[in-house]
């Protein structure tokens, strides 16, 4: 299967406790079969996170790949958006380093 035809999903990292693996929760909207109302459905995928670049709360794009383990069939392609907590911690770290230099 060519890389261009693999399934791609966008979701939020809900767990990053494993080494080189994250759990990504993907949300989709489906219509109720009888009433037609939109229903929010979620599914969790274990994705390979080489280099541990994706952290808890990040918005990531994952792509289907060959089986990497018993439950891992997806890999993180890119981090689309860093979580707010992570960005805040990074700003505090930079500010602390600037204070230490003075």
Image (spheres, helix red, strand yellow):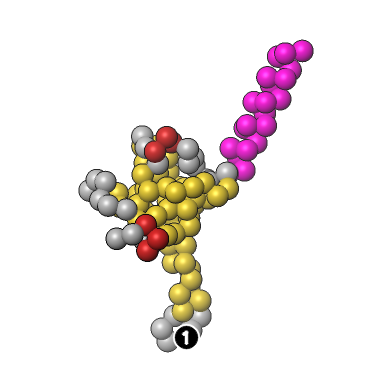
Residue 70 locus on image (x, y percent)? 22, 48
The stretch drawn in magenta includes residue 99: yes
On screen, residue 45 above or below 86: below
Give the quarter of the image for residue 18: top left
Residue 14 locus on image (x, y percent)? 45, 47
Give the quarter of the image for residue 97: top right
Residue 101 locus on image (x, y percent)? 72, 13
> Which segment is the magenta one?
83-102
Residue 23 appearing in the image: no
Residue at the bottom extreme?
Answer: 34
* Residue shown at 45% from the left, 75% from the top: 30
Q: Residues within 10 Å of mark 1 (few under 14, many from 20)?
A: few
Residue at the left extreme?
Answer: 70
Nearer the observer, 49 or 22: 49
* Residue shown at 52% from the left, 46% from the top: 79
On screen, residue 23 above or below 93: below
Report the side of 11 relative to 74 (left or right).
Answer: right
For label 1, the SS is loop
The stretch drawn in magenta includes residue 61: no
Q: Quadrant of the C terminus?
A: top right
* Residue shown at 65% from the left, 36% from the top: 88
On screen, residue 18 above or below 28: above
Give the quarter of the image for residue 3: bottom left
Q: Main secondary structure of the magenta part?
A: helix
Q: Quadrant of the N terminus?
A: bottom left
Q: Disc 1 designates what residue?
A: 35
């Amino acid at each position: 299967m060519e890389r261009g035809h693999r399934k791609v999903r966008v979701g939020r990292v809900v767990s990053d406790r494993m080494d080189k693996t994250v759990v990504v929760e993907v949300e989709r909207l489906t219509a109720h079969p009888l009433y037609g109302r939109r229903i929010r459905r979620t599914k969790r995928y274990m994705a390979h996170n080489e280099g541990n670049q994706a952290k808890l709360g990040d918005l990531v794009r994952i792509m289907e790949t060959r089986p990497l383990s018993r439950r891992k069939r997806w890999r993180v392609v890119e981090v689309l958006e860093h979580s707010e907590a992570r960005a805040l911690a990074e700003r505090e770290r930079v500010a602390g380093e600037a204070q230490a230099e003075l």
